[in-house]
Image (spheres, helix red, strand yellow):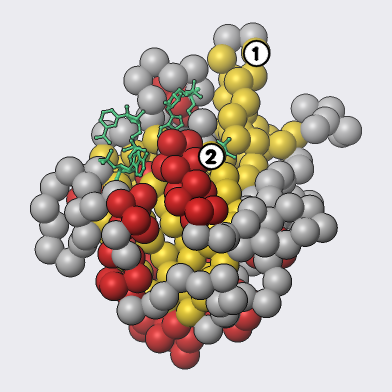
Amino acid sequence: MTANSKYTTETITYLHRWTPNLFTLRTTRGEAFKFVPGQFARLGVQKGDKIVWRAYSILSADYDEHLEFLSIVVPDGEFTSELTNLKVGDPLFVDKTAYGFLTRDRFEQGKDLWMLATGTGLAPFLSILYDFSAWEEYDRLILVQSVREKAELAYEDTIRAFATHEFYSEFAHKLHYVPIVTREVVEGALDTRITDLLKNGGLETATGIPLDQERSRIMICGNPDMVEETRTILSERGFTLSRRGAPGHLAVEQLW
Ligand SMILES: Cc1cc2nc3c(=O)[nH]c(=O)nc-3n(C[C@H](O)[C@H](O)[C@H](O)COP(=O)(O)OP(=O)(O)OC[C@H]3O[C@@H](n4cnc5c(N)ncnc54)[C@H](O)[C@@H]3O)c2cc1C
Ligand SMILES: NC(=O)c1ccc[n+]([C@@H]2O[C@H](COP(=O)([O-])OP(=O)(O)OC[C@H]3O[C@@H](n4cnc5c(N)ncnc54)[C@H](OP(=O)(O)O)[C@@H]3O)[C@@H](O)[C@H]2O)c1
């Protein structure tokens, strides 16, 4: 790496496997690396004589000294088949710039922040939840996490622990957590896709919170089909996409 390189070389400091194809990794964080909760980093792995780069939503808090990510393993995926073999102490390249617009500054004057995630789309929402100003700005924070199987409900304990956390618990009554497991029956979780729950009112019933344009600001992240279908359903109900200089009700990010 040269002094004016576009990236820094960080070190993997922690790994945790939720399932054979889903894991958490932490790296050191370059002193100058800044991001807004909700943004993504670009991570690089060495593959032969080239570096392969991929976008990764940052899961950790902006105040953390480390960076944390939640990764899928795609069988034969160019990037993740390398990433999954890395060990604590191995290097990982991190682009010096953070990117993306799945950030709270896309919205104005909301009261309820809805965060709708499938799979690893959870990551940016944890970073947002670690941000105290999100809890101060909104009356209610609704986190919906949809996965296929119970074992993929990564961070469920972390999310539930906001309620007793020494710094977050005073706000914790604001958090409504809705786990969804679509391919197993799991006590305490819904079993229906986010899109169907929006169409049949199931999310509003489960939370007791109505979706309305005055109060609701909605972030959507994950599977591209889910993002697109959800956006369409909400557009038909009058919710508009936030654009630069034209705040609306929706902010979206597709992971592939
Ligand atoms: C803005 C942004 C943020 C992202 N954040 C994350 C993240 O936090 N964690 C993460 O694991 N990936 C994330 N991704 C996806 C990531 O960039 C790579 O696609 C992923 O690491 C797989 O890389 P690959 O080379 O192994 O396979 P690729 O060739 O990149 O992908 C092959 C196929 O794998 C599937 N796939 C890719 N990514 C995912 C995923 N996240 N979940 C389910 N299926 C997937 C798709 O079917 C895709 O066509 C993000 C992508 C974008 C654009
Ligand atoms: N997770 C596994 O066990 C598994 C196994 C083999 C391969 N894979 C591969 O791994 C990749 C990612 O798997 P993943 O489980 O993280 O992601 P995923 O397929 O996007 O599923 C995550 C969640 O999103 C839901 N979902 C998918 N499409 C949707 C849509 N159009 N509208 C609303 N909800 C939708 C799923 O519900 P549904 O369950 O109803 O689809 C599930 O609850 C895929 O490419 C897959 O082929 C995963």
Residue 83 in percent (x, y) is at 47, 28
- According to the image, label 1 marks what residue? 50
56 or 44: which is nearer to us? 56
Mark in front: 2 vs 1: 2
Q: Quadrant of ligand 2?
A: top left
Residue 33 picture location, percent across and down? 74, 50
- The amino acid type of the residue labelled 2 equals Gln
The part of the image, by quadrant, that contains residue 200 is: bottom left
> 7 left or right of 3?
left
Instruction: Give the mark, 2 or 1, whose residue is nearer the N terminus.
Output: 1
Q: CA distance from mark 2 to mark 1?
A: 26 Å
**Classed neighbour count for the residue bearing mark 2: other residues with Cα under 10 Å, few (<14), some (14–19), many (≥20):** some
Does the beta carbon at disc 1 come under 8 Å from ligand 1? no
On screen, residue 1 above or below 149: above
* Other-residue count near label 1 (Cα within 10 Å), few / some / many at <14 / 14–19 / ≥20: few
Residue sitting nearer the eye, 57 or 144: 144
The foreground one among 88 and 50 is: 50
Considering every residue shown, the one lying at the far right of the view is 4
Image-based side of 108 in relation to 187, left or right: right
> Which residue lies under the disc numbered 2?
254
Q: Answer yes or no: is residue 15 visible.
A: no
Q: Residue at x 36, y 83 (%)?
A: 164
Can you say whether 61 is above or below 208 in the image? Answer: above
- Asked if the beta carbon under badge 2 is closer than 8 A to the nearest atom of ligand 1, the reply is yes
Whether residue 188 is visible here, answered yes or no, is yes
